Image (cartoon, coloured by chain):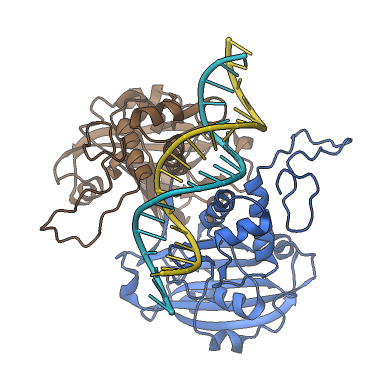
Chain colours: A blue, B brown, C yellow, D cyan
Amino acid sequence: MPQMPAPSNDTPIDAADLSDSASTQATPAFRPLYQQIKGLILNSLRLSEWKPGEAIPSEMELAGRYRVSQGTVRKAIDELAAENLLVRRQGKGTFVATHAEQHVQYRFLKLMPDSGDLSSEGPAQRLIIDCKRLRASAEIARALGLRTGDPVLQVRRVLSFADKPTILEDIWLPGGPFKGLTAERLSNYSGPMYALFEIEFGVQMVRAEEKIRALLPDAEQCQLLKIEPNTPLLSVERIAYTYNNAPMELRRGLYVTDTHHYRNELN
Amino acid sequence: MPQMPAPSNDTPIDAADLSDSASTQATPAFRPLYQQIKGLILNSLRLSEWKPGEAIPSEMELAGRYRVSQGTVRKAIDELAAENLLVRRQGKGTFVATHAEQHVQYRFLKLMPDSGDLSSEGPAQRLIIDCKRLRASAEIARALGLRTGDPVLQVRRVLSFADKPTILEDIWLPGGPFKGLTAERLSNYSGPMYALFEIEFGVQMVRAEEKIRALLPDAEQCQLLKIEPNTPLLSVERIAYTYNNAPMELRRGLYVTDTHHYRNELN
DNA sequence: CAGTGGTCTAGACCACACT
DNA sequence: GTGTGGTCTAGACCACTGC
């Protein structure tokens, strides 16, 4: 009961809770009920109570569980759907977003053929160049929220479209959550890498930030991408986050942009 | 009255209107009430019934005008706010979004100093290189929805941060809506260019698409940006749209990315 | 048909800004 | 205090899916 002052597990905290007497924060800390419900749903997602691709309980069911009205649950789910953590399907239910069955194969890849027609070039060919265990440099550690020297996994691969090498990626993953990841498992899996992360390691990438620059490749990069020296490339540095805003991947891609471009929409 | 079958001005069409008998479209054309309200509000924005920076009528007032409940108006405004066409301010009202007073000075510019601290480098210095009238090439015309040979305005300028030339921009604008724009007016105006468009020409940019590539500059570009040849640059091609999704600007920027980067967030 | 999300309403009350 | 947007509820009905 949202108006009752005795919070328990699975029950939203009453908004009338007093802020700590000796607190230094100035915010009065008013949290709408639906935000608290959103937090509870997020918790269930974090704890994998509902797995990617599965349906979560109906709005009425959740309203009963949390002792709030359907409209309040609805507003919580609305926000989670706007953040692409949940997917609503009228008449069927609300589902946990997934990188696997998703029609949009590469959710975080903004590179497009200049023709604009994604289907024209067919699926990407993937070639794993390297996959090795090593210790995090200071820079890698900082990006992944680890300590320098912590074990990390490094993957290098090339993506080709219509037999033309187009993307060279270096990927760094924290060693703990991704223990057991090998070049073989990567090569054998057909589908987005993030789908493999979800299914095999229970790691869901939910959000990412990218920093984009232009640069000239070195000799090794030229060779792997089969391009001339002095071909300018896009450098796309991505940090991908799971629930809790915890960084779980650092990825640095080099994109050849003579027949493709990075597409972005601004609002 | 939403249930009445006699639509008039400022009254939403009843959803029960039958689709044209000989129509080839398969969609049953059900439009929720709040979508119709959204359309009416959008119309008022297009017609400048409320101008950028001004408050629109309160939710209750609009509910009265359109003969629907406050909740329905609210949902319409929610979507317009999500699209950054309106800005809600609790306790004050709902305002038409503007490029002028907006705290975020450059709404569409995603270039950030590597430090991440935008305020560290102060305001950009702007230098208008050129501003001339000419006839649209086929490419320009297509991007702006004009016909080849139609009059267009071309502006070239350089933006510097902390005295370092960083962005070289070529801008093409349709001649009609921007009649009377001169290098002087551009130079004399202190503030975002899109704010000038709003105030002086009544053109509001609402949305944009960008295509990003890497390239090497030519001699002239090197000179204007004061960089060495063989410095790779970001090429950012932007089409900006006003209400109705009508393209109103083509802009091609060259970004120097040794101390700055293009920042993007993915969801 | 039942179950799900989606829309719409009417009313009560809360948080915030201004005066 | 008054007026604004923001939250929450309860109930009715609609649209879509699948049995």
The image quadrant where one finds the C terminus of chain A is top left
The quarter of the displayed image where residue D19 is located = bottom left
Relative side of B44 to B71, left or right: left
Residue under the point 52% across and 71% down: A99
The quarter of the displayed image where residue A239 is located = bottom right
Q: Residue furthest left?
A: B22
* Residue B151 vertical placement versus B190 (above, below): below
Relative side of B91 to A90, left or right: right
The quarter of the displayed image where residue B202 is located = top left
Residue under the point 56% across and 83% down: A129
Residue under the point 36% across and 37% down: B205
The location of residue B64, given as percent across then percent down, is 38, 28
* Residue B178 vertical placement versus B13 (above, below): above
* Residue B266 vertical placement versus B61 (above, below): below
Can residue B242 be seen?
no
Residue under the point 74% across and 67% down: A137
